[in-house]
Image (spheres, rainbow, N blue to C red):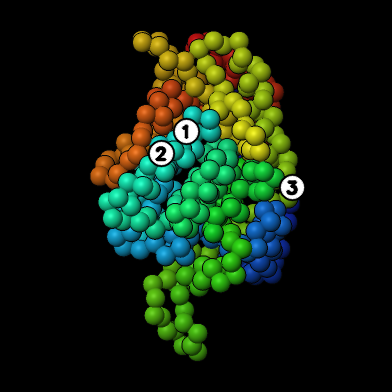
């Protein structure tokens, strides 16, 4: 039986045309019409004022932190329950992540724990430099509450929307709420350029500075002069071409991811020990349902754990993955402060990501549901 992957790339019919044109016109460089086109189309798709195409979402987060002024010795508030790529760039800046627990509705940063964290850091005499928000698995964080706190405490916001392209909060696309927003076009994301990312902002000066830093920070001189550290973070014109083809499909892809989530909800409803979650979108939230995730019921001695379930699916040649292991439990961040922790630790202990690729057929889904039923 063919392998069913977790979230493989799903190409349309136009990516190759953009690639073909780039090769014909000799635009094989980290500059060219596909990059400017991709950036303009990303602005149209998200409503952002400016977009800067970059080599990865991680690079975009790194530049985003620099744009918000994060430097050596600073502290950055960050959810613990996320992929390591959210927090690694905090370390690149020589700063320290201050981890905050999730809330149970959306699995994203808990506003109550965030308030505690901010007040405690202030009490310790150190004001956090920025707030890094994540919309996990495409589900909007509780932005009303979180942004109110950011405003009250005057904290600039960086929005890691790497998993949330096409999702909305009160009708507004995610990625456009913070001073800077970030998307990823890695191979497993809802749209892909194989590898790539973008930074979006409504501030023209910040966008200009992002481009400057992403291209080795060249001073305006007729020769090579540099007075600041720069990076080589610009996306290739070839990959931006793939991105243009992919972006045409965003609406379809979000629709299909949401259908897949609904399919699992319906067809797994009879399994008492497993629930598709987070089930409900809070009022005003529209998730892209990038990955469908499930939680196993708790019990004193569960016979089925996420790992045994994953191993059983593997025997049927079906890929599944654990939820992100909280960052405060990672050896890398052993000394970073953490506020709360019980919520995301419980989610990690009970959760699993199911195949969610938009090219899956009904037979694929039935095969997955059958394998889950066998295991449970
Ligand atoms: C994928 C991802 C990133 C990193 O994006 P890359 O393009 O792979 O560097 C950052 N944050 C989250 C939450 C992600 O899922």
Q: Is residue 292 above or below residue 8?
A: above
Where, by quadrant of the figure, is residue 182 drawn? bottom right
Q: Quadrant of residue 326?
A: top left
Q: Is residue 308 visible?
A: no
> Residue at (30%, 50%) from the top-left corner?
123
Q: The residue tagged with tag 1: helix, strand or loop?
A: loop
Residue beneath label 2, please? Answer: 113
Residue lying at 73% horizontally and 40% vertically, measured from the top left: 252
- Name which of mark 2 and mark 3 comes first in the sequence: 3
The answer for how far apart the CA atoms under marks 2 and 3 are is: 46 Å
Work out whether mark 1 precedes mark 3 in sequence or the reverse, and give the earlier one: 3
Marks 2,1: beta carbons within 8 A = yes
Is residue 197 left or right of 342 when viewed as pictured? Answer: right
- Disc 2 element: helix
Q: 255 above or below 75? A: above
Q: Label 2: how many residues lie within 10 Å, few (<14), some (14-19) or many (20+)?
A: some
Across and down, in percent, residue 246 comes to 68, 49
The residue under the point 54% across, 59% down is 179
Q: Which mark is residue 13?
A: 3
Residue farthest toward the left in the current orientation of the protein? 335
């Amino acid at each position: 039986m063919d392998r069913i992957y977790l979230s493989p790339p799903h190409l349309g019919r136009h990516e190759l045309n953009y690639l073909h044109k780039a090769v014909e016109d000799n635009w094989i460089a980290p500059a060219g019409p596909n990059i400017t086109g991709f950036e303009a189309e990303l602005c149209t798709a998200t409503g952002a004022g400016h977009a800067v195409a970059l080599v990865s979402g991680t690079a975009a987060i790194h530049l985003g932190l620099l744009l918000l002024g994060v430097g050596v010795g600073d502290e950055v508030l960050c959810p613990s329950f996320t992929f390591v790529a959210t927090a690694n760039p905090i370390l690149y800046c020589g700063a320290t992540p201050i981890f905050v627990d999730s809330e149970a509705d959306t699995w994203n940063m808990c506003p109550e724990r965030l308030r505690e964290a901010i007040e405690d850091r202030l009490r310790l005499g150190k004001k956090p430099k920025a707030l890094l928000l994540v919309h996990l698995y495409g589900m909007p964080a509780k932005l009303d509450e979180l942004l109110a706190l950011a405003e009250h405490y005057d904290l600039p916001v960086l929005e890691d929307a790497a998993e949330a392209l096409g999702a909305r909060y009160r009708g507004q696309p995610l990625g456009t709420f913070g001073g800077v927003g970030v998307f990823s076009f890695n191979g497993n994301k809802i749209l892909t350029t194989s590898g790539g990312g973008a930074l979006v902002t409504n501030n023209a000066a910040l966008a200009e500075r992002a481009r400057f830093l992403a291209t080795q920070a060249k001073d305006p001189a007729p020769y090579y002069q540099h007075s600041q550290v720069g990076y080589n973070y610009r996306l290739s014109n070839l990959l931006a071409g793939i991105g243009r083809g992919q972006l045409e499909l965003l609406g379809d892809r979000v629709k299909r991811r949401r259908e897949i989530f609904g399919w699992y909800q319906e067809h797994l409803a009879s399994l008492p020990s497993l629930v598709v979650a987070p089930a409900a979108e809070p009022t005003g939230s529209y998730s892209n349902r990038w990955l469908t995730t499930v939680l196993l019921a708790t019990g004193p001695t569960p016979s089925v754990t996420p790992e045994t379930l994953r191993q059983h699916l593997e025997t049927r040649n079906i890929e599944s993955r654990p939820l992100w292991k909280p960052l405060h439990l990672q050896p890398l961040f052993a000394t970073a402060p953490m506020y709360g922790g019980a919520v995301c630790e419980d989610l990690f202990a009970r959760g699993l990501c199911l195949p969610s690729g938009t090219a899956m057929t009904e037979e694929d889904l039935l095969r997955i549901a059958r394998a889950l039923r066998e295991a449970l």
